[in-house]
Image: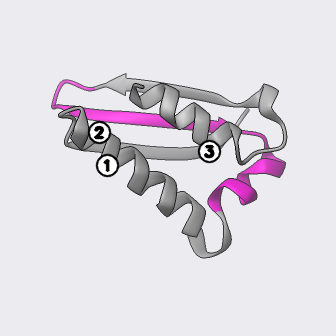
Amino acid sequence: MNIKELTEYIVLSIVRDKDNVTVNVEQMADKLTTVNIFVTDSDLGMLIGKSGKVANAIRTVIQAAGYANNKKNIKINIDKNN
């Protein structure tokens, strides 16, 4: 399972509006991988969690998967859809 599939699996298991979830993975030139997660405004709070605990847990799991795939630098952005 790659980073994008894992991120989609985790996010889709948390949010209510599964049709409006977008996950983009961008490989930058300086070995940085950026994972952008876009959800609806109503699901944003649920995905971030109280004091950011859910977001931090997602970051931990995705970064651990990145280390397993030799991707050391992973940045995760969570935002709402436009």
**Pointers 2 and 1 in contact (CB under 8 A)?**
yes
Residue displayed at 19% across by 24% down: 29
Q: From the top left corner, tell me how far across and down residue 14 is, in percent.
A: 71, 48
Closer to us: 39 or 2: 2
Question: Magenta segment, which residues?
Answer: 28-48
Q: Nearer the viewer, mark 3 or mark 1?
A: 1
Q: Which residue carries the number 3 mark? A: 79
Which amino acid type is shown beneath numbered disc 3? Answer: Asp
Badge 1: how crowded within 10 Å, few (<14), some, or many (20+)?
some
Q: What is the C-alpha distance between the residues marked 3 and 2?
A: 21 Å
Which amino acid type is shown beneath numbered disc 2? Answer: Gly
**Mark 2: secondary structure:** helix
Q: Which residue carries the number 2 mark? A: 66
Q: Which residue carries the number 1 mark? A: 64
Closer to us: 52 or 28: 52
Q: From the top left corner, tell me how far across and down residue 79 is, in percent.
A: 62, 45
Disc with the residue nearer the chain's start (3 vs 2): 2
Task: Tell me which corner region of the image, top left, top right, bottom left or bottom right, holds residue 15.
Answer: top right
Q: Can you say whether 43 is above or below 36 in the image?
A: below
Badge 3: how crowded within 10 Å, few (<14), some, or many (20+)?
some
Which amino acid type is shown beneath numbered disc 1? Answer: Ala
Q: Nearer the viewer, mark 3 or mark 2?
A: 2
Does residue 10 belong to the magenta stretch? Answer: no
Q: From the top left corner, tell me how far across and down residue 55 is, in percent.
A: 55, 58
